[in-house]
Image: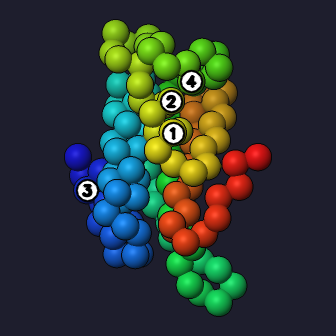
Amino acid sequence: MQAARAARQMAEHLGFGRAQAYHVATAASELTANMAVHAGGGTLHLQPLTDNDGSIIGLEMRAEDQGPGIPDLDLAMTEGYSTARRLGCGLPGASRLMDEFSISSTFGQGTRIRAIKWCRHRPVDRS
């Protein structure tokens, strides 16, 4: 809950709309829950993204753990798939809530996720 609250508060402080701030908070909650359940913990970094003139254009989240790694990333990103007898919505859900989402994982070394939410006035390239 602390991560979700911090993410929402930062998004609101940066000028994100209410819905966008809650998308960021929900994604943060899902990512930190996954780190707790599957890796025994980890770190969530939140960072504002600025344009050349210093104006806020987005918010970056980086989730990093030193857990066992994810053996099959494609399967882990499949809606409904879970190794922990949960709903299997965490990673795919977080991906849908954010504008950009990338994940890398190495067996025995952990998982790194980078997710970005752009401010609503910035066009999002989905190609």
Q: In this view, which residue lies farthest toward the bottom?
A: 53
| Residue tagged 1 | 96
As drawn, is 53 to the left or to the right of 47? right
As drawn, is 4 to the left or to the right of 112? left
Instruction: Tell me the CA gap for discs 2 and 1.
Output: 6 Å
Q: Secondary structure at mark 3?
A: helix
| Residue tagged 2 | 92
| Residue tagged 4 | 77
Type of amino acid under label 2 = Pro
| Residue tagged 3 | 5
Dot 2 or dot 4: first in sequence order is 4
Q: Given contact means CB atoms under 8 Å apart, are the residues at marks 2 and 4 in contact?
A: yes
Type of amino acid under label 4 = Met
At 56% across and 84% down in the image, what residue appears? Answer: 55
Instruction: Tell me the CA gap for discs 2 and 4.
Output: 5 Å
Within 10 angstroms of label 2, few (less than 14), some, or many (20 or more) residues?
A: some
Front label number (2 vs 3): 2
Instruction: Tell me the CA gap for discs 4 and 1.
Output: 11 Å
Q: Position of residue 37 (x, y in %)?
A: 35, 25
Instruction: Tell me the CA gap for discs 2 and 3.
Output: 21 Å
Q: Given contact means CB atoms under 8 Å apart, are the residues at marks 1 and 3 in contact?
A: no
